[in-house]
Amino acid sequence: LSSQELLANLEQLAVGLSGGPDSCALLLALTSLPAPMPALRVVHFNHGLRPEAADEAEWCVRLAASLGLHCEVVPLAVPEHRRAGESLEMTARRQRLAWWAARFGGQPGVAVALGQHQDDALELLLLRLARGSDSLGLTGLRPPS
């Protein structure tokens, strides 16, 4: 399917914007597609784990504004929701996916676009190998269940 065919039946497309190259490239690519386009909703998650997190959130807000879009900044309290044996990164990912599912899951005409690249899948695979995962854990990134 072409990008136009994929987007044809959508009213809204929520786009995750971390500020990294993959999500920025995704947002820029989506804003450059010809009309008709679904309404774009930009979302940035501020995990508050690093001192520069607030600056990164502001940068994402400014990038979205430069494209004529509003960027919603969602704070996530990662350490408070960390499960036993779970890394901060996995906790943050679990929280983001839960937020996406709660906010947009099952809504007709709405889809979520997340920028991922090959290194994300490889990183997850290596983390699972290091933890001694079984064969089910060796599949890389999967959609949330």
Image (cartoon, rainbow, N blue to C red):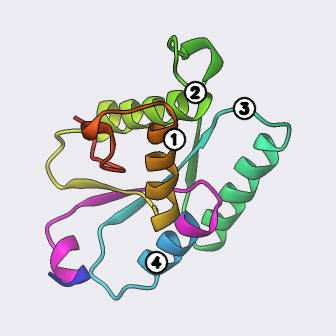
Q: Earlier in the sequence, mark 4 or mark 3?
A: 4
Q: Earlier in the sequence, mark 3 or mark 2?
A: 3
Query: Which numbered circle lies on residue 94?
Result: none
Report the residue that reaches farthest toward the bottom: 34
**Where residue 7 sits in the image (x, y, percent)?**
22, 72
Q: Earlier in the sequence, mark 4 or mark 1?
A: 4
**Where residue 38 sits in the image (x, y, percent)?**
29, 68
Q: Is residue 117 visible?
A: no
- Is there CB contact under 8 Å for labels 2 and 1? yes
Q: Residue at x 71, y 62 (%)?
A: 62
Label 4 crowd bin: few (<14), some (14–19), many (20+), radius 10 Å: some
Nearer the observer, disc 2 or disc 4? Answer: 2
Residue beneath label 4, please?
A: 31
From which residue to which does the magenta span run? 4-22
Which three-letter amino acid code belongs to the residue tagged 1? Leu
Nearer the observer, disc 4 or disc 1? Answer: 1
Using the numbered discs, state the Cα–Cα distance from disc 3 to disc 2 in whole angstroms.
15 Å
Query: Which numbered circle lies on residue 127?
Result: 1
